[in-house]
Amino acid sequence: MHATEYSQQLEAAAKFIEQHDDFLVVSHIQPDGDAASSTYAMGWLLDQLGKTFTMINEGPMPSKFSYLWGSDQVLDFSKEVPSRRYKTIISVDCADFSRIGRVSTLFDEQAQLLNVDHHPTNDRFGSCHLIKHDAAATVQILYDLAIHMNMSLNLAIGDCIYTGLLTDTGGFRYSNTSPEVMQIGASLLALGVQGSEIAEQVLERVTYSQIVLLQKALSTLSFAHDRKLAWLAVSLADLESTGASSEDLDGLVNYPRNVEGVEVGMLFKEKAPGVIKVSLRSSGLVDVAAIAQSLGGGGHVRASGCTIQGAIEEAIARMVQEVGSKLI
């Protein structure tokens, strides 16, 4: 993106925030580290400006990010539904409107929406857009916005930005780890962020249910197309027998992807009977965002997802064919 265009987007977003109040801040369903961190970071920004706001998600936020500012303020729509509608919305890290989930029922018909995101597949929903496709994470954009608005950063926002960058770059290992990302990370460490402690909390530590679920999932490891494609499957019965939550599925897709020679790794997760969430990870030769988008999903070239209706075996057969056609 041209620097001038991005500066104009930052200014438009700043004006949107300055000229409105009573915001509803939302991220995507089943939030990951960037979605959670972006929600809290935006909440912090609004709080510093003296704005009224409500943070909400369709379900619970991952507990491992409970050390972040504002984590105790987010409403869980599945348990607590506000009895009103909101006219001013800020969505963070949502590639398309459907990713907001049932929270969108709280939007007023005439609602104004600021769309802040970094996904290449973003369909530019909303009335104001702050979208930077080459940003490593949505928190990187929020960092730029805070700087653009001449805000004084403190440790609270620093932890949020650093956490989002750390998780969406795979611990600063993925190809989206740019010089700019490292410069921002360094400035946050200088601010007092304890990088090693955050890495231990969000990347290294696993729960008992997570390790038992991993044990079950690895027993389903399968390969196709000369072992260029590999996948794991997790059923509702697996989740129930291990006591695991959807949060415990985080990172599982990397196990098939990391096998030597594998070009695309997949994880099939049964969300409900007949509803299968598919996570895709690519080594770089296959654009999994294009595959996911063709099936109603989206994401990044190397990391995407979609949802397929049907039995888990049917979803696997379909995806093996879809991805396999790109491996030939």
Image: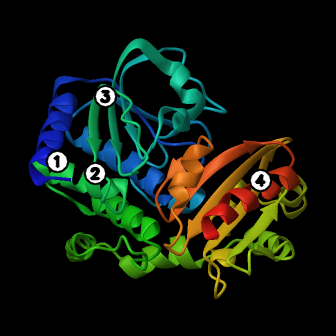
Q: Which residue corresponds to the image point at 40% horizontal and 61% vertical from the top-left? A: 164
The correct choice, above or below, for 124 with respect to 182 in the image is above
* Residue 39 x, y percent position in the rendering: 41, 46
Residue at x 14%, y 52% (from the top left corner): 2
In the rendered view, does 49 fall on the left or right side of 66? left
Q: Residues within 10 Å of mark 4 (few under 14, many from 20)?
A: few
Spatial distance from mark 2 to mark 3, Cα to Cα? 26 Å
- Residue 318 circle label: 4
Q: Nearer the viewer, mark 4 or mark 1?
A: 4
Between circles 4 and 3, the one closer to the viewer is 4
What distance separates the C-alpha of mark 2 from that of mark 4?
A: 32 Å
Mark 3 nearby-residue class (10 Å; few <14, some 14–19, many ≥20): few
In the displayed structure image, the side of residue 24 where residue 263 appears, left or right: right
* Residues at discs 2 and 4 in contact (Cβ within 8 Å): no
Residue 163 lies in what quarter of the image? bottom left
- Residue that numbered label 3 is attached to: 52
Q: Are marks 2 and 1 in contact (CB under 8 Å)?
A: yes
Of mark 2 and mark 4, the one earlier in the sequence is 2
Which residue lies under the disc numbered 2?
132
In depth, the one of 97 and 71 nearer the eye is 97
Q: Quadrant of residue 296?
A: top right
Type of amino acid under label 4: Arg
> Which of label 3 and label 1 is nearer to you?
1
Q: What amino acid type should be assigned to the residue bearing mark 2? A: Lys
Q: Which residue is mark 1?
A: 6
Name the spot of residue 79 as percent of width and height, x first.
66, 32
- Indicate the colouring scheme: rainbow
First in residue order: circle 3 vs circle 1: 1
Identify the secondary structure beneath mark 2. loop
Closer to us: mark 2 or mark 3? 2
